[in-house]
Every structure is written in C-alpha cells, then in structure tokens.
Amino acid sequence: MMNKLPVFIDCDPGADDIIALLLGMNMPELDIVGISTLCGNVEAPKTYVNALKTVGVAGKNIPVYKGAETPMTRELYTAKDVHGNDGMAGLSDTIAAPDVSEEKEKAWDAIYREAKKYNGELTLVAVGPMTNVAIALAKYKELASLLKQIVIMGGSAAYGNVTPAAEFNIYVDPEAADVLFKSGANIVMFGLDVTEQAILLPEEIEKIGQMTSPQAKFCYSILKNTEDFYLSKGFAGNCMHDPCTVMYLAYPELFSGKKAGICVETKARITRGKTVCDMFTDVKFGFENALVMMDVNRDGFGEKIIEIMSRY
C-alpha cells in the first residue's frame, strides 16, 4: 500500500484554489487532512463557503477551518476582477453547500495540531496570502520545525502581477510573508516565474469539458469562466498558479528550481510585497531560505491534470 503524504491546505478560493483542491483531493499520493481558509481573492466568509462547496462536490469528508478575516496590518485587497465577486467565477449560487457542522477550531490551531500529530511528516500548502501561516508560526514557536515543508504559491524571483514588483498573495499581506520567510521553515516557493509557464491550454480545457463527473464539470465551468481573463492578458491558456503546489507534491519531476535567499519588502510603497530574490544577483544575502521553482514540464503538467480529472 502506498504511503500517502499528509497535507494541510491553506487557501482563499478563488478559481485556481478550487482547481488545486479538486486535484489534491483526487491524488492517491496525497492525504488531505485539513483545509483552512482566509481572506484574499475575496472576503473570508466567501472563501470559507467556497472551500466547503468544493469539498462537497468532490464527495470528500475533510474538515474546513476558518482563519484570518483581514491581513495582519493592512486593508484587504481582493482579486475579484479575476475570480468574480463570489470567488467562484460566478458559479457559487449553482453549487449547494454540504450539510456539515462548522469547525470551531481556528485555522492556525488546526495547522499546529496536525503538525504535532504527524511529527515532522506534514506538508503545509499555502496558496493564499500567508496570514494564517504567519499567525500559526508566531503562536507556536516550534511549528516550523514540526513541519516537513511549507509549499507556497506566492512571490516571484523577477516580477509581479499586481504591481511591477509584487505578486498578489505576497502583496495582500507582506508582513505575514515576511514572518514566513524568516521562520526557518523548509520553504518551497512557486512564484510567477514558474506558475505563468504552467498553463492549461484551451484544447486541454475542452478535454475536461468532455468528462461527465460532477467534479470535472465543476472544474470545466471554473476554467471556462476565467479563460477570457487569461487570454486577454496574452497567455496561451489558463495559468494554473495554485495547482502547481499539489502537482509538485505528487509529481516533483515536473518541476525544477534552485535554492535562493528571499526577503520580503514591507516598508516601501512602490515595491510593497516584492519578494527580493538573490538568485540572479552578484550580491547574495548570505542565506538560502527557500527552494525557488523556476521551470515546469508544461506538456507533462497538462497531461497529468487531464489524467487526474478523468479519475473522478
């Protein structure tokens, strides 16, 4: 029997968060032991409901925990232009919420409890702003050493997508990201450098559209409702930002990167939220605190997503 990797997913669904959840929950290599939500792509009450609905569509029984309703020190900046007002590309009213009791435990406490339970084997995946992660790391000083790794979607070695300097998840709560990168945790960073290469092409999206499971139909609707946004930005298809993280856990051979030093800009205005990376510079920070992913086997990535969705 395969030894499954225990995984806790912290997210702000969000279209690509939803696809990451649908993929992760149907990977035999992974055991999703918990999901937590926070404000980010849309407000916290919406991301929580979206996660519940996604788990319901997948037919799984995975607890979902509520987390931060605001960034640590800043006003919330959302991405409704990409994900719609509901965070579900306009589909929320068409998806029923499962009849489950609300978890009373907060996200950061659940993350710590599961980390203790798995004692060094749990992977924390963070695909939203890093607020819940930072609170957990601040509250529980030993958490960084209890986790196998923290795999994030956020930042970039080179550029941004909210501003020329900053990627969305880091821009929303740079102070939280700063806590993470200073924590000493084993960090794997999927920034825009690689996630904007991890594209699902229109013809691949149509292959998912031919599948008949509720999960595939849901995934297809999400993809189609966000396709025009990506095409209008000059991409060849939909960027699978958040799905890169779970795909990496099951199929690490699809990706490559290297260790580098990362610092987060929290004080400046023009470069707020920039992940300053020393990978391409002559002057180094003197530490390497993250494995920064830079490349993806695009064709293999697309094929695997289609294969996983066809399993439902």
Image (cartoon, grey):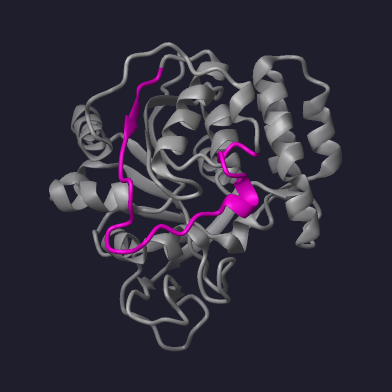
Query: Residue shown at 47%/82% (left/top)?
Result: 270
| The C terminus lies in quadrant | top right
Q: Residue 18 in the image: x percent, y percent?
A: 56, 34
Q: Residue at x 41, y 22 (%)?
A: 3
Can see residue 228?
Answer: yes
* Quarter assignment of residue 94: top right
| Nearer the observer, 46 or 274 | 46
Quadrant of residue 31 in the image?
top left
- Residue 82 magenta-highlighted: yes
Task: State the image coordinates of residue 283 (x, y, percent, origin top left).
Answer: 41, 88
The N terminus - image quarter:
top left
Q: Is residue 173 above or below residue 109?
A: below
Front in this rendered view, residue 270 or 189: 270
Instruction: Say whether residue 166 is magenta.
Output: no
Whether 38 is drawn above or below 100: the answer is: below
Give the farthest residue toward the right. Answer: 203
Does any portion of residue 144 appear in the rendered image?
no
Task: Looking at this view, name the residue that lies furthest to the bottom.
Answer: 282
Q: Main secondary structure of the magenta part?
A: loop
6 over 157 or under it: above or below: above
Q: Residue at x 58, y 76 (%)?
A: 164
- Residue 175's x, y, as percent? 30, 65
Report the span colored magenta.
Answer: 62-89
**In this picture, residue 193 sits left or right of residue 103:** right
